[in-house]
Image (cartoon, grey):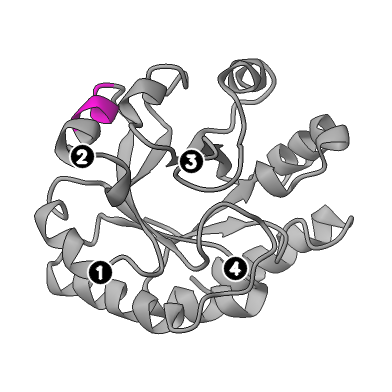
Amino acid sequence: MKNKISASLMCADPFNLKDTIILLEKYNVNYLHIDIMDGKFVPNLGIGSDFIKSLRKHTSIPFDYHIMVKEPDDIIKLLDIRGNDLVSVHYECSFQIQRTLDNIKKNNCKVMIAINPATPLCTLEEVIYYIDGINLLMVNPGFAGQNMVENCMKKADKVGRIIRKLERKDVIFEVDGNITFEHAQILKEYGANLFVGGTSSIFSSNNIEDNIRQFKDSIIHND
């Protein structure tokens, strides 16, 4: 998979969202990163299902769902998941993670495991051949604008090594949280190929066009 960008709508200005979506389409951003939160699994609330259905009517960009809820099986069916979407779910959020992955796969989308900063990477062993990707959280999930958790760069390096060792070149390796232009360059070398752009990059200033160009320079040019 070529390196791609997923723009975090959680970090966008809601009052200018229409204009923002137009810019993201103009500059060929690959995914819209949508955070689904319930105030329980993480201490925050995210985008609701009605908003998602409305958003579908105004953009053709695929969705990159990051599901941060307890008992996600009850939420998945509300999200209008489509075949070209990505869906990340946390290992810890479901008592029967295999069943949850099966339920997501029914939508013919790409199914991914989200890994928190403190989640042991050994959890990947039981699902690595069953999933399409890994979403490595570089911050504790729930809030935008956080600094990267110490040691997450080393953890990203380990994930890249695991993927290469298991010869899973087809696996999506997403990194999410405090992905600055500089961090993106390093994470690219570790094997990351999908980069969530939020307050540290795409939405770090009002000049979204220049931010996207700089982000692409960090991860796509000379790819």
From the image, tell me which residue sits under label 2: 95
Mark 3 and mark 4 lie on one chain; the one further toward the N terminus is 3
Residue 155 place in picture, x, y as percent:
35, 78
Query: Is 151 placed above or below 82 here?
Result: below
Badge number at residue 120:
1
From the image, tell me which residue sits under label 4: 179
Q: How many marks?
A: 4
2 and 3 marks in contact (CB < 8 Å):
no
Q: CA distance from mark 1 to mark 3?
A: 21 Å
48 horizontally vs 1: left or right:
right
Check the picture and name the quadrant holding the N terminus.
Answer: bottom left
Q: Residue at x 63, y 80 (%)?
A: 182
As shown in the figure, which amino acid type bears the numbered disc 3? Lys
Q: Residue at x 24, y 22 (%)?
A: 106
Image-quadrant location for residue 74: top left
Which of the two residues, 203 or 222, is positioned nearer the viewer here?
A: 203
Secondary structure state at the residue bearing disc 4? loop
Residue 130 place in picture, x, y as percent:
14, 45
Residue 173 place in picture, x, y as percent:
36, 60
The mark lying in front, picked from 4 and 1, is: 1
Crowding near pointer 1: few (<14 within 10 Å), some, many (20+)? few
From the image, tell me which residue sits under label 3: 40
Mark 1 and mark 3 lie on one chain; the one further toward the N terminus is 3
Q: CA distance from mark 3 to mark 4?
A: 25 Å
2 and 1 marks in contact (CB < 8 Å):
no
Secondary structure state at the residue bearing disc 3? loop
Q: CA distance from mark 2 to mark 4?
A: 30 Å
Residue 212 place in picture, x, y as percent:
72, 58
Query: Is 208 placed above or below 86 here?
Result: below
Mark 2 and mark 4 lie on one chain; the one further toward the N terminus is 2
The mark lying in front, picked from 2 and 4, is: 2
Provide the residue span drawn in magenta: 102-106
